[in-house]
Structures are given as structure tokens and as C-alpha cells.
Image: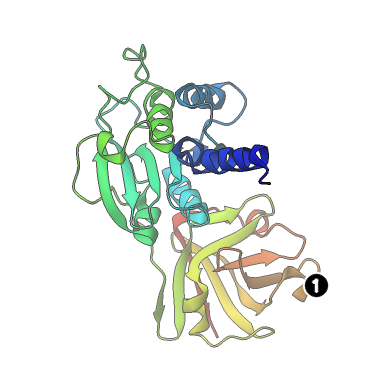
Amino acid sequence: MPNYKFMTLKIGIIALFLSPSVWSQHALVFQTDFGLEEGAVASMKGVAFGVSPKLNMFDVTHEIPRFNIWEAAYRLNQVADYWPKGTVFVNVVDPGVGTARKSVVLKTKSGHFFVSPDNGSLTLVSESLGIEEVREINEKINRLEGSERSHTFHGRDVYAYTGARLASEAITYEQVGDLLEPSVMQLDYVKPKLINERIVGNVPILDAHYGNVWTNISVDLFDRLDINIGDEAWVEITDNGQELFMQKVKFVSSFGGVGIGEPAIYINDILNLGIAINQGDMANKYKIKPSSKVLFSIWK
């Protein structure tokens, strides 16, 4: 005889997992320059939780240097492609909070969403993932109730609230606000290029915990120099024309390919070229700070 209790339980489990309320929650991922010394991040997550207790919330980082829009752009681009389609990123590095800068949600061709001030923070994800649409947040609809007189914490009152509503599917993307031109504010930076058998790029970021220096030179572009593991290549790093470092450096697959205290060039975890000192601090030793004016050149 059929086991009707088992069949009923099985049907119930299948119905639960097919229920839109279980699977309609997308990841909500936060990035700010707030730090964790006080309650700003917790306030944002509290607002999101109030929209939907089922939301899965995560962090890129809350340690972006204060007001550093360029680093915000880089860190978003560093991680976004590893998150699934439908993920909603809330970026709050917003030195112009309360001014006329637009509050937008970028939908990329990859199906990711970025809730952010349109201040250059979306430069790199718009290039790497492509722009599908951009909408301006309608604060008459998508703003935390009771916050209308607050003009200095849009991260909580507008971005976390809108991001949570979008990730939980309390609203559709079309309900964010009016459609804008498919573009976002772009930061100026040196795009890597090969010129006369020399690649020139820049130092957009540090692997700060270890002091490794990262470039925006992709492994595909680097491969055009035909430099193999164990080969040496000339490396020059300049800051606004002033030389910080220049010498021949060995190309290795990992840091142990050179002796302790020796420099090495390598391919980092996001498949860009980096330079480090094995068990040392390259950035500190040579006073290298990430900037659009810090250029990195490499040649045989």
C-alpha cells in the first residue's frame, strides 16, 4: 500500500522549495567607508532586515579609506563577477552626500545591480560588466519612512532601503525610479597598453594587508611580452613622473619563487600583474601609494 503520510510530506517539501518566497531573495552585499567603530553599518543592515528578515546580507568591506571613490570602484569590480546574477550591491562611499549628485541603481548586462551615488564609484563595473540600464532612485517611494529631514545618511535611508526592497523583490527594478541615459560618471585613469614592447599601466590598488602592489595590467596583455616563469623583466614605477622603483625582477608563479626579502612579479588572484617582496612590504619600502598618477611599466 502507498505510504500516504510520506507522500504528503514529500509533496509539502517540494511545494516549499518551489515557493517563490523561498527563492526570490537575492544576496544583498554592502560596501562603505564607514569603518566598524560605530553603528552606521548596523543601522543600514537593520533597515534592510526590517524590509525582509529573510535577506542574506554580506559585505565587501567597510574599510575603504574615507572618501576614496577610486578604491570603492576598484573593490566593487574586484568581487562583483564572483557573485551570481541578481545580486544587489549597496555602495556607500559618498563624500557628496546631500548634494545634487544622483542616487542610482545600475543594472549591468551580467544581471547584477549596484545601488550607489553616481560619483565615479561605478566606473569599473560599468566597463567590465556592461551597462544594461541606469535608473535614478525615486526617493518619494524608495526612502525609509520618517527619514525625510535627514540629508547626511543616504546609505541608510535611501541605499540600504532601496537595495533591500530590490533584493527581496518587494519592488521590481522598474519601480526604482525613472530611466536615465545608459551611462554613469567615469573616473579618469590610465588604461594599460602595449607600446614598443613595453606595457604601461597604473597602480590602482594595494593588497594592503601584505603591502603587495597590484596593477591594472591583465594576464592576457602581459602574455604578449612572452615572459615565462623564471624570466626576469625590467619594472619601473613612477609617481607623477618621479621614479620610485626600477630594477630587473623575476617572474614567479608564487612568492616562494624568490628568496625572502627579494622582489617578484606575479599574477594575482584576479589575474592582473602584481609585484611583491617575499615576506616583505613592497608598498611601504618604496613609498608606493595607489593613484591614477602612479604608473607601472614592464619590459624585457
Image: 119 above or below 206: above
The structure residue drawn at horizontal position 44% and vertical position 59%, both measured from the top left corner, is 240
| Most distant residue in the front direction | 1
Q: Is residue 154 left or right of residue 216?
A: left
Does the image show residue 161?
yes
Which element type, helix, strand or loop, lies under badge 1? loop
Residue 63 is situated, as x and y percent measured from the top left of the image, at 57, 38
Residue 85 is situated, as x and y percent measured from the top left of the image, at 44, 52
Q: Which residue is mark 1?
A: 259
Amino acid found under the numbered disc labelled 1: Gly
| Most distant residue in the right direction | 260
Q: Residues within 10 Å of mark 1 (few under 14, many from 20)?
A: few
Which one is in front, 156 or 121? 156
Q: Is residue 215 left or right of residue 85?
A: right
Residue 252 is situated, as x and y percent measured from the top left of the image, at 69, 77
Which one is in front, 50 or 61? 50
Does the image show residue 61?
no
Image: 241 above or below 89: below
Image: 240 above or below 247: above
Which one is in front, 282 or 133? 133
The structure residue drawn at horizontal position 48% and vertical position 21%, both measured from the top left corner, is 50
Q: Quadrant of the C terminus?
A: bottom right
